[in-house]
Structures are given as structure tokens and as C-alpha cells.
Amino acid sequence: MGTMDNIIEVSPLAGERVAPMAPPLPGTATSSYNQKGYLMNGSQQRRYCCVSTSTKELWDRLFDEGYRADVSIYTDNGGTIYAHANILGMSSPVIKSMLKKSKRRGRQRSISIPGVPHDAVRAFIRFLYSSCYEKEDMEEFVLPLLVLSHAYVVPELKQVCVQQLEQGLLTIENVIDIFQLALLCDAPRLSFICHRMILRNIKAVSATEGWQAMKQSHPILERVLLQSKIDEDNRQKDRIRKTNEGKIYLQLYEAMEALVHICRDGCRTIGPHDKDFKANQSPCDYAACKGLELLVRHFAACKLRVPGGCVHCKRMWQLLELHSRLCDNSDICRVPLCRTFREKIRRQSKKDEIKWRILVKKILRTKTIAGAPFFSSAIASSR
């Protein structure tokens, strides 16, 4: 066979030649792989971009060696970094504008980046070339790099700095400084992370040097943080209170279910007078039945069975009245005194009526139901 026959398989069934499977894409260990979709002539086309490690190393070497560099960048303490105007201008619109305004000396141009360490500026310029950085440089100069990324509009570097701070470089000692810097550098995610960390560790953070410096230079920001802590504590207390209230309302609903169950079906050794209890009766599914059974027995035998005369009886009176407000049809309900309480409701004061309505509404809302289907079905099945 010829060369083409060596790379084409022949189908054993139809004798057709079938192209072999395509080789796998380059691995992520040796290259970074990005894919973007483009519309051309109304059809979806794919363009692939594979940037290998050797290509990144080439850009790094171009920066390190300064081959045919045409820009001199002056830093503090008399430092100079050589770079290429085309690369700087395409990477940062601010530097591009600075280069247009800079004075030429033949092919050479010069700009200044003061206010940050020389090595931080070098790490910044290197990132503009290859989007790479040394781990040690990032750990040491993450804050100057964040400032440079904001000042010279390099969002990719700003995102990297925020990620590095979020993943471990943010500490109790530096969180105040970074929080103030995030506000100045328009880094909302970083400011949110710092704010959350400050509120969670307010006692430790308020003892740091950064807090004392902020207290002197930005007292308003200190008051804002303290007020945020107060608001957060109040919200936390409100959440705990609502959770506990929800548990109580749920327990009341379950008690209402158990009360109907006892009076309709009977449970263990207590129930309606016509209930035939068996020794091998299946266990009850209602968790509130055991406590409610003891309360019913006490209510039946207590000699002080008047409202306010006995704590346990008073609780039973309240449960019976609550049931009557949830019951759909008191005429056929088998729960004791249901109809009596229905008639009492008509003579109740408006203030008490409002309190009971609010309680019933919260109980039903906790159970996430719009009405009381359990009680309706219980009454229907008792006919």
C-alpha cells in the first residue's frame, strides 16, 4: 500500500476506508489551552489557542535580556528596567498614554514608576510580558502589585492578586491595611472578604497595629466597622430568635396533630371511649403523643382543672383553644371542647383575637402550608 493506505483503516464490513481517531489534545501539564467560538458566514467556527511553556519562557527571556528594548523605566533608588513599547502599550492603556507623552531620544523613550520597590515594578512588567510571576515575588509584593494593577489598569493582574490574598496571604495582622487598599483600588470582592474577616475576628483585629493606625487616620472608617459589627450581631440574634420560634411553632403544630390522633384513633392506652386497644398495637408515629398523653391524663384527673388554677391544666386549655382555631368543622370534631371554644371565640376581645390569629398564621407558615389539611382530613375520616 501507499503512504495514505498506511494511515487509513479499512472497514471489514463494507470495505470502506475510515479515518483513524484524532490524537488527544495537548496535555495541561505542558501547555495552557483555551477555546473560543466565532461566527463566520453564519456557521459556528472554532479557533484554538495553545500557549506552550516554551512560548512563555521565550517572552520571559525577551524581558530578562531586554533584546532591542526601546523603553527605560525608572524606579525608586535609581533603578532602571528595560522593556519594549509595543508590549507595554498593548498591555496597559495607561502606560500607552504615558509613552505617547514621553520624550524621545532617538528610538529610546523613558517613563517613571515611583512609589513602589524596584523588584515590585520588575515583577509587574514581567507579568505584562508573559502573565507569569514568581511565587516569592507575589508573596512579598502582593500589595504593591495590587496598587500597580489598579493604577495602570491591568485587570488580569488585579484578579491574580485578589485570588492570592484570598487563598492565604490575607491574615489578621494585615487585613485592615488590605481592606483600606481594596477600597481605594476598586476591588469589591477583596473588600467584601476583608470586611467579613474583620467582623468574624473583631476582637483580634482591633488589637493590631493596623487598626490603631486606621483609628488615627480614618476614624470614620473605624466607626463604620464597629457599627457593621453591631448590625451583624443583631442580625445573628434575630436569626437565632426566628429559628427558635420556628421550632416552637412546629412543636405546636405537631401537638395539634397528636391531639387529633389521640381523640380520633387512640394511642397506646388512651383514646376515644369506643376504641378497642390491642396488646400488639403498632408503635405511634407521632413524636408529641407521649408527652401529650401524660398531659391529657393529668387534665382528666386534676382537681384544680380551671384556667389559671394549674400550670399543666392551663397549658391543656391553651392547646384545646388552639385546636379549635385550626379545626375546620367543630360540629363533628372528636376533640373535647372544640365546639365550646368556637363559641367562646365569638365573645373574645379584639385584642386577644388578633394575638391568636397571629399565632395560628405563624404555625401554619412554619409548616409551609396554606391551610390546615391535616385537620380537614381528620374530621372527614371521623364521619
Image: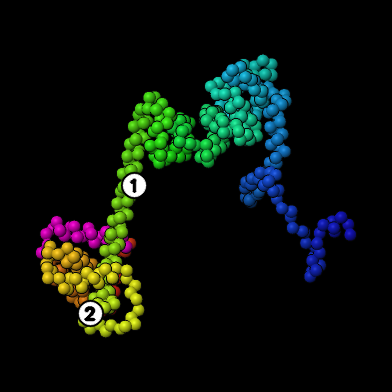
Decide if residue 108 is in sight here.
yes
Q: Which residues are magenta?
A: 346-367
* Residue 267 lies in quadrant: bottom left
What residue is drawn where x is 71% and y is 53%?
24
* Chief SS of the magenta region: helix
- What x and y, as percent, mark residue 304? 11, 68
- What x and y, as percent, mark residue 330? 19, 73
Residues at marks 2 and 1 touching, judged by CB atoms closer than 8 Å: no
> 100 or 227, which is in the foreground?
227
Q: Which mark is residue 272?
A: 2
Q: Which mark is residue 236?
A: 1
Q: Magenta span has 366?
A: yes
What residue is drawn where x is 71% and y is 29%?
62
Task: From this view, report whether residue 317 is shown above or below residue 56.
Answer: below
> 114 or 195, which is in the foreground?
195
Decide if residue 91 is in sight here.
no
